[in-house]
């Protein structure tokens, strides 16, 4: 069950062909079992960094060492295929990797159960609410049991209540899984609540400005959000972001 | 999960009311009026018993909606029927009031004569039978042409979709095909494909393939970047990308093309009958014959039959499209 998968970025820079300098010398490591939250102003290159990590975008400088064979990537949109039912959407990655039909189906059912969508297997995406679509998207990424998890503001479009619910469930979901993850968000509370570390980034070109450890043990319960220590950490993150905007 | 969407007012209102023990008779005049108007037992009476005004309002709104829907449904067949009656009336008027006997016979015989000399005559050489037989011929040409257009059109679009240069090098010729008048191609087609059925099918394909190509290509290219990213992330082959992303996503557009192509094939098959007269007699040739022999009731019968045939094909494609796309695609239910 344990894993030795880690992500390493050293001096990663990105300059797009049109001259946009998106990332500047990003250096950090995500150790096995760590879940790092990435916070920064809009347009500072967070999505770009995840795309580089996953291999979707070629970076222009530095070294990016991420095992690519087992990546779970949850995009900002649910990116479900509208012509497939929930069940078939969750099975998609299994089809990509030639998983046997029966195994694909059981794994998908398990994942759907896990994210709380049991009973909605035969619905099409347009019949689901935004939150339910996101659950389906998370279920899809679970099927291949990835060792590296990348989240790009997955709950950014949802309301606060739904988002907190999904955060709670995400934590309980991953309690048993071993992986290294990066979670991009623009919600400071979400970052602190979910992660083992919060890294803040400056406005473009994106640089790392702080790296704040979050010492709370897992499992974390929802009331953690009202603890003074929690508020203090949120304050720290917020302060370092103010520097970013200055 | 708290997010389960409860769209239906109906069951919830029924639930609340059934939980309530049936209390006194209608309390207010307003709600009782609503109950009486809706007339039936069960949910309606129950809604009447809900003390809140909300239930009454909901029932009222639903009733208004129901009535509107019924009115719309009635309008759907009533309006065309009235138009039909008007057309028949004008037809009689022109035929009997505006024309003398000779013109009536050679230009516009009255509607009942179209029935007695056309639709209601069952004979080897007269009336509806040769017309139906010719429609069978024309229909076969149209359907073969449509099948070829769809298969070939989709294949060409897929080829064009594989590379920008392929698209650039094929597209101008597709346009040329589309804008060339069929009449200008008739002599060549005669040389290449002969005077019979084959040339008629080619005419259909020439007319129908362009909308299939353009719509399919548009559909294939409308796959979203975020979906492409998802596929790229897992290093899938371009064949997988085609079969699991681009083609399924293109289905609504393909059906749009198919619908245009179906109409085009019917026209193409009838037009082809005029020019390529060897082999089985199609409805186009029959129309021509009837016109030359002044068999006007049969001419009108054949024209109407050709119309109906076109409508049937068009409606069938619409039905098929609706059936296949309705479950996931929003616009699918909107047309037909
Ligand atoms: N393909 C691209 N070509 C040029 N510029 C890009 C491209 N993708 C992103 N950018 C730019 O790079 C910057 C960082 O983008 P992004 O990583 O999406 O920011 P974030 O996710 O932090 O909001 C933005 O200014 C954006 O406009
Ligand atoms: Mg982003």
Image: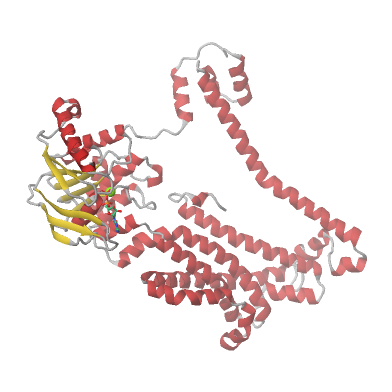
Quadrant housing residue A169: top left
Of residues B170 and B113, the one nearer the viewer is: B170
Question: In the picture provided, is B65 more to the left or to the right than B103?
Answer: left
Q: Residue furthest bottom?
A: B191
Quadrant housing residue A48: bottom left
Quadrant housing residue B286: bottom right
Residue, x 54% and y 19% (percent of image)? B48
**Residue A57 shows in the view:** yes
**Residue A55 shows in the view:** no
Of residues B133 and B222, the one nearer the viewer is: B222
Residue, x 88% and y 65% (percent of image)? B104
Residue, x 56% and y 64% (percent of image)? B260
In the rendered image, residue B106, in percent from the top left (x then y), is placed at 85, 70
Question: In the picture provided, is B114 more to the left or to the right than B258?
Answer: right
Of residues B25 and B54, the one nearer the viewer is: B54
Where does the C terminus of chain A fall, quadrant-wise?
A: top left
Question: In the picture provided, is B285 more to the left or to the right than B252?
Answer: right
In the rendered image, residue A231, in percent from the top left (x then y), is placed at 18, 29
In the rendered image, residue B181, in percent from the top left (x then y), is placed at 62, 77
Q: Residue furthest front?
A: A246
**Vertical order, A220 against B254 (above or below):** above
**Vertical order, A90 against A195 (above or below):** below
Of residues A220 and B66, the one nearer the viewer is: A220
In the rendered image, residue B285, in percent from the top left (x then y), is placed at 70, 76
**Vertical order, B302 against B249 (above or below):** below
Question: In the picture provided, is B79 more to the left or to the right than A51?
Answer: right
- The image's colouring method is secondary structure
């Amino acid at each position: 069950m344990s894993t030795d998968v880690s992500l390493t970025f050293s001096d990663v820079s990105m300059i797009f062909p049109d001259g946009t300098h998106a990332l500047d010398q990003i250096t950090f490591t995500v150790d096995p079992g760590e879940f790092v939250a990435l916070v920064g102003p809009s347009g500072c290159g967070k999505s770009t960094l995840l795309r580089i990590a996953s291999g979707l975008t070629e970076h222009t400088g530095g070294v990016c060492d991420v095992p690519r064979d087992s990546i779970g990537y949850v995009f900002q949109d649910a990116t479900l295929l509208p012509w497939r039912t929930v069940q078939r959407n969750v099975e998609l990655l299994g089809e990509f990797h030639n998983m046997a039909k029966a195994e694909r189906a059981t794994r998908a059912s398990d994942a759907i159960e896990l994210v709380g969508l049991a009973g909605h297997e035969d619905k099409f995406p347009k019949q689901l609410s935004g939150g339910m679509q996101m659950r389906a998207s998370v279920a899809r990424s679970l099927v291949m049991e990835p060792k590296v998890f990348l989240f790009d503001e997955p709950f950014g479009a949802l309301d606060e209540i739904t988002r907190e619910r999904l955060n709670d469930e995400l934590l309980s979901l991953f309690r048993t899984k071993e992986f290294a993850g990066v979670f991009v968000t623009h919600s400071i509370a979400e970052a602190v609540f979910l992660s083992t570390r919060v890294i803040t980034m400056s406005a473009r070109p994106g640089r790392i400005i702080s790296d704040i450890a979050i010492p709370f043990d897992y499992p974390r319960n929802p009331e953690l959000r009202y603890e003074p220590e929690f508020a203090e950490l949120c304050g720290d993150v917020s302060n370092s972001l103010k520097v970013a905007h200055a | 999960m708290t997010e389960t969407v409860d769209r239906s007012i109906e069951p919830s209102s029924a639930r609340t009311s059934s939980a309530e023990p049936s209390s006194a008779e209608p309390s207010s005049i307003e709600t009782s009026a609503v109950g009486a108007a809706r007339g039936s037992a069960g949910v309606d009476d129950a809604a009447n018993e809900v003390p809140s005004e909300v239930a009454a309002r909901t029932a009222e709104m639903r009733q208004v909606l129901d009535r509107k829907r019924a009115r719309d449904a009635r309008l759907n067949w009533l309006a065309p029927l009235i138009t039909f009656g008007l057309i028949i009336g004008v037809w009689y008027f022109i035929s009997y009031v505006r024309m003398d006997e000779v013109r009536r016979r050679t230009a516009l015989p009255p509607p009942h004569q179209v029935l007695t000399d056309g639709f209601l005559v069952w004979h080897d050489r007269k009336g509806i039978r040769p017309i139906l037989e010719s429609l069978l011929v024309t229909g076969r040409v149209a359907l073969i042409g449509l099948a070829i257009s769809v298969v070939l059109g989709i294949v060409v679009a897929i080829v064009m979709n594989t590379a920008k240069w392929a698209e650039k090098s094929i597209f101008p010729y597709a346009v040329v095909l589309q804008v060339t008048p069929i009449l200008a191609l008739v002599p060549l087609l005669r040389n290449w494909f002969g005077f019979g059925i084959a040339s008629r099918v080619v005419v259909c394909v020439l007319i129908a393939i362009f909308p299939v190509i353009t719509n399919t290509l548009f559909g294939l290219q409308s796959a979203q970047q975020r979906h492409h990213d998802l596929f790229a992330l897992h290093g899938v082959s371009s064949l997988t990308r085609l079969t699991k992303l681009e083609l399924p996503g293109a289905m609504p557009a393909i059906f749009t093309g198919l619908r245009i192509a179906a109409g085009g094939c019917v026209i193409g098959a009838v037009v082809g009958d005029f020019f390529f007269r060897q082999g089985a007699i199609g409805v186009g040739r029959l129309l021509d014959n009837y016109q030359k022999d002044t068999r006007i009731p049969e001419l009108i019968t054949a024209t109407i039959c050709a119309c109906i045939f076109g409508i049937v094909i068009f409606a069938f494609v619409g039905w098929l499209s609706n059936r296949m796309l309705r479950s996931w695609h929003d616009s699918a239910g909107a047309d037909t």
